[in-house]
Amino acid sequence: MLDRSTGTIAHRRFTDLPELIQPDDVLILNASRVIPARLRGVRAHGGPAELLVVEQRADGDWLALGHPGGKLKVGRTVAIGPDSTVEITGILGGGLRRIRFVGALDGAATLARYGLAPLPPYIHHTPNASDRERYQTVYAEHDGSIAAPTAGLHFTTALLDQIRGRGTAVVTLDLHVGIGTFKPVRVEDLAQHPMHAERFAISADVARAINERHGAGGRRWAVGTTTVRALETVADAAGRIAAGAGETQLFIRPPYVFRAVDALVTNFHLPRSTLLMLVAAFGGYEMVMQAYREAIRERYRFYSYGDAMAIL
């Protein structure tokens, strides 16, 4: 735990979180559900191919990352199964391809039948059926993400019930995690980093609950950097949340001034990631770097299934 007001660092267990959250506060979760977005198939000439399906477009085509990229040219096909074939219909920037499902199964049906959990590349086992549920938060509800909002993986239903039992409001929004969340920063001028758009939705009831709690003096706890980006996208200058749905390309980095978040629960992130830059903006660069040095010294786990940090 990092206290921004004092710069102090404390080592706590995640089950201690209810002690840190006050009854007047509001806890805000990202309820986006991870889709089985990884597809493996065979190219027309027999070679293997893999697609990471990102999202469906309004025109019915889908966006996907493909491997091997040099072989997946426009017009070529990948057989996912006897009833599902993908055709490459366009080459976009950043490794993205536009694809179309041309077999008997459409995209959603193909993912349901053949899709694998899009586990991060540092998890080396082949995704299996159990990963479809293990790589989800317990409150995941609406399909759309290609990576889990990992800060939420620490919560159990019992812990959430305990937090609610203390009087804290617990609400959910959606920000569907796409490649923009984890694409590394490769430019020196941060203003030149392309943030891919990600879809979000915040209901009127959720916006009202957040605004009422904050108006009464309660703190707004965001679980995960994706939750922060959704809230900051729709907050006005006074920090009031507006309900709505759309896409966000907001890239939060120092010296960003936060309007909609008072406390953050987040995992430990990779260098040169937009996630770490958001955390550094929220916690203060020097304090966050000190916390990271402490975490490394204490052998905390990083990445998706790693440990978490609360920043107050």
Image: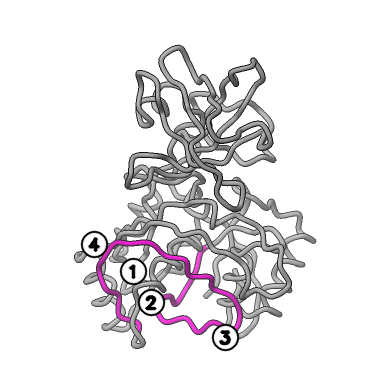
In the rendered view, tell whether residue 125 sits above or below residue 185: above
Note whether residue 99 is visible. Answer: yes
Q: Secondary structure at mark 1?
A: strand
Structural distance between the alpha carbons of marks 2 and 4: 19 Å
- The mark nearer the N terminus, 2 or 4, is 4
Give the residue displayed 27% in from the left and 83% down from the top: 215
Task: Tell me the quadrant of the picture where the N terminus can be found.
Answer: bottom right
How many angstroms separate mark 1 from mark 4 (CA)? 15 Å
Look at the image and say whether residue 53 sits in the magenta stretch. no
Q: Which residue is mark 2?
A: 219
Image spot of residue 23 (x, y percent)? 32, 70
Left or right, 234 with respect to 147, comes to left
Judge depth for marks 1 and 4 and give the one in front.
Answer: 4
Residue located beneath label 4 in the image = 203
> For the residue marked with disc 3, what is the amino acid?
Ser
Residue holding disc 1: 26
Q: Which residue is mark 3?
A: 5
Please tell me whether mark 3 or mark 4 is closer to you in this view.
Answer: 4
The three-letter amino acid code for the residue at tag 1 is: Val
For residue 245: magenta? yes
Q: Are marks 1 and 2 in contact (CB under 8 Å)?
A: yes
Going by the picture, which residue comes out furthest to the right? 297
Question: What residue span does the magenta drawing correspond to?
Answer: 239-265
On the rendered structure, is 223 left or right of 208?
right
Q: Name which residue lies at 33% across and 69% down.
A: 26
Residue 231 in the image, given as x and y percentages of width and height: 38, 70
In three-dimensional space, the C-alpha distance between marks 2 and 3, rounded to whole angstroms, equals: 14 Å
In the structure shown, which secondary structural element does the residue marked by tag 3 occupy? loop
177 relative to 124, above or below: below
Label number found at residue 297 = none
Q: Amino acid at mark 2?
A: Arg
Q: CA distance from mark 1 to mark 2?
A: 6 Å
